[in-house]
Amino acid sequence: MLRLVNISKSFGEVKSLENVNFAVWPGEVVGLLGDNGAGKSTLVKIITGYHRPDPGGEIYFHGRRVENLTVPQARRLGVETVYQEKALADKQSLWRNIFMGRELSNRFGFLDVARMRRETEALMTAKMGFTSKAVTTDTVVRTLSGGERQGVAITRALHFDAELIILDEPTMALSLSETRKVLDFVTSIPQAGKSCIFIDHNIFHVYPVVDRIVVLDRGRVAGEFAKAEVTLDELLERLYRVAKTGEMT
């Protein structure tokens, strides 16, 4: 679905990325690991069109090369990003958050509030797992738990036909039970035929739900392998090696 070839990005004297090759296949969850400063955020901003790579880098979506990718163009290509708990408007209702920026209207051009509420209610039961009568379509998002908020954000992306969902540390500051909810949502992404980039520091969160793992270190790809090729203990050992030497082998 996505392929980056020889992607580099410099900010003045600082080189954030250097000759990075990265790919995501349809229906695949790719774990993107790396310490602070490894280049994860810069790579995501290039995929989403926020930053342009240095000359020489190439970006392909579904096999077609994209020149001068912009944020609106990336969204049209099906890229959606969920940023921790900042993806929602806390003081707005559930249905408003689901349709924010994509409001439905009737044939007269007015907002079709009834339809948006109906669709949100269906999503609450089928996708978000809200079965309690205490949570309704008019529930204010700030009253939800962290895991529930992330579930709403992921469901919104799936509902609007995102092809590639980027999760930027979605389990940060969540309890164990809330983290489990988020990881369950991640497993639903490939089941829906979509792809996902799962960015996190915590390998114990990433490993159970991904198909492939890419490790960035100081702007370079330090390692890449299918999860089936390495146990969790072996992965931990390789990550320790990266921290010491910058290489996984």
Image (tube, rainbow, N blue to C red):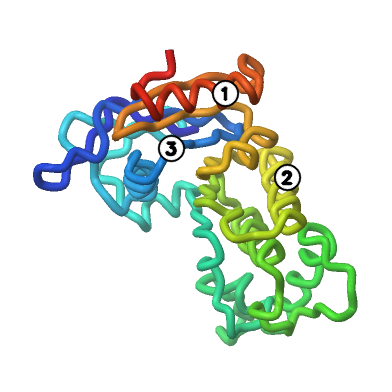
Classify mark 1: helix, strand or loop.
helix
The quadrant holding residue 171 is: bottom right
Q: Of the residues shown, which amino acid type is indicated by label 2? A: Ser
Labels 1, 2: front one:
1
Residue 157 image point, x, y percent: 59, 57
Q: Secondary structure at mark 2?
A: helix
Q: Where residue 34 is drawn, which disc sits there?
A: 3
The local crowd at label 3, few if under 14, some if 14 to 19, many if 20 or more residues have their Cα within 10 Å, is: many
Q: Is residue 164 left or right of residue 140?
A: left
Q: Residue at x 48, y 36 (%)?
A: 33
Is residue 43 positioned above or below 212 on the image? below
Instruction: Return the residue at label 1.
Output: 235
Which is nearer the eye, 204 or 215? 204
Q: Nearer the viewer, mark 3 or mark 2?
A: 3
Q: Residue at x 31, y 26 (%)?
A: 5
Work out whether 152 lies above or below 11: below
Which residue is at 59% across, 85% downward? 91
Using the numbered discs, state the Cα–Cα distance from disc 1 to disc 3 in whole angstroms: 13 Å
x then y, percent, for residue 242 = 41, 25
- Please state which of residues 106 and 221 is positioned toward the viewer in this rendering: 221
The tag earlier along the polypeptide, 1 or 3, is: 3
